[in-house]
Image (tube, helix red, strand yellow):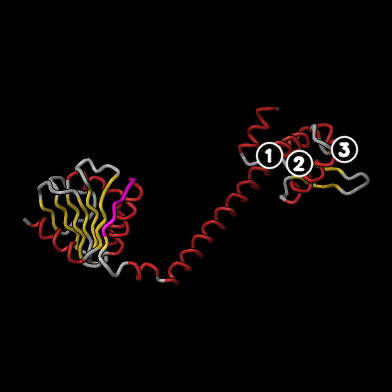
Amino acid sequence: MKSMENSLRDLGFNQYESRVYLSLLHEGPLTASAVSAKAKIPRPRVYDVLDSLSSRGIVITHPGRPGKFHAVDTDTLIELLKKEEEEKFQKRINSYEKVRKVLEGTKLSKKNTNGETVWVLKGEKTIHGKIREIIQNSEQEIIISGNNLSKKMSLHKNLLNTASEKGVKIKLISEKPGDFPVTEHVKRDSVHMIIGDSEAVLFLNKKEGNHAIWVKSNHLTEDLKKMLKK
């Protein structure tokens, strides 16, 4: 019984909910007082638990004096819990979209990116998040430089495919080919960086650790492009 309680708690049940459900599953239908005795739950609390589980469709109430309760079978329980999780997930997705619209409405990104910007990026997720932005924002050219970086760019293959389909030129500077569409391939190793129309991410070493520099500047980006041509 203890292991079954733990399994239900892994699915989000609290201790009392687990005991009530299992008692009704094995012994039901039961009156509230019988549930309290079987599940070893204080009588005042058992009504709250039964009401909570009933509202979720996990416990079914039989009218009468006294009323009785029984639990849905395990297959129905799992389907109900899955549906609850799907609804919670959809609510989270909807809330993200609402936040996106609010932020887009403030036009913060346009206000903050008019000037030249240089930032230090820390952490692989942060770095590759910025790389995704560069690929998505580029309308003319993307330059991918460095052997190790060309391998890692396979993480962004779908975005690069989309950019290529939009007519964005993709130049690869690497001794090895990349697993993504390339307009021009220069076969040599070079400084590890990715450059878009007006911004770039520069890795501080060839191992591409958790530190990089993000540059947003037309002037600096053009200088980096000229440096790669030498």
* Residue with the mark numbered 3: 33
Q: Residues within 10 Å of mark 2 (few under 14, many from 20)?
A: many
Q: Closer to the camera, 181 or 113?
A: 113
Query: Number of numbered discs present?
Result: 3
In the image, which disc is placed on residue 71?
Answer: 2
Residue range corresponding to the magenta coloring: 118-123
Q: Is residue 40 left or right of residue 92?
A: right
Identify residue type, mark 3: Ser
Amino acid type for the residue under numbered disc 2:
Ala
Can I make out residue 152 in this image?
Answer: yes
The residue labelled by disc 1 is 14
Percent from the top left, x then y, of residue 160? 27, 57
Q: Disc 1 marks which amino acid? A: Asn
Q: Secondary structure at mark 3?
A: helix
The image quadrant where one finds the C terminus is bottom left
Tell me the distance, in whole angstroms, between the alpha carbons under discs 1 and 2: 16 Å
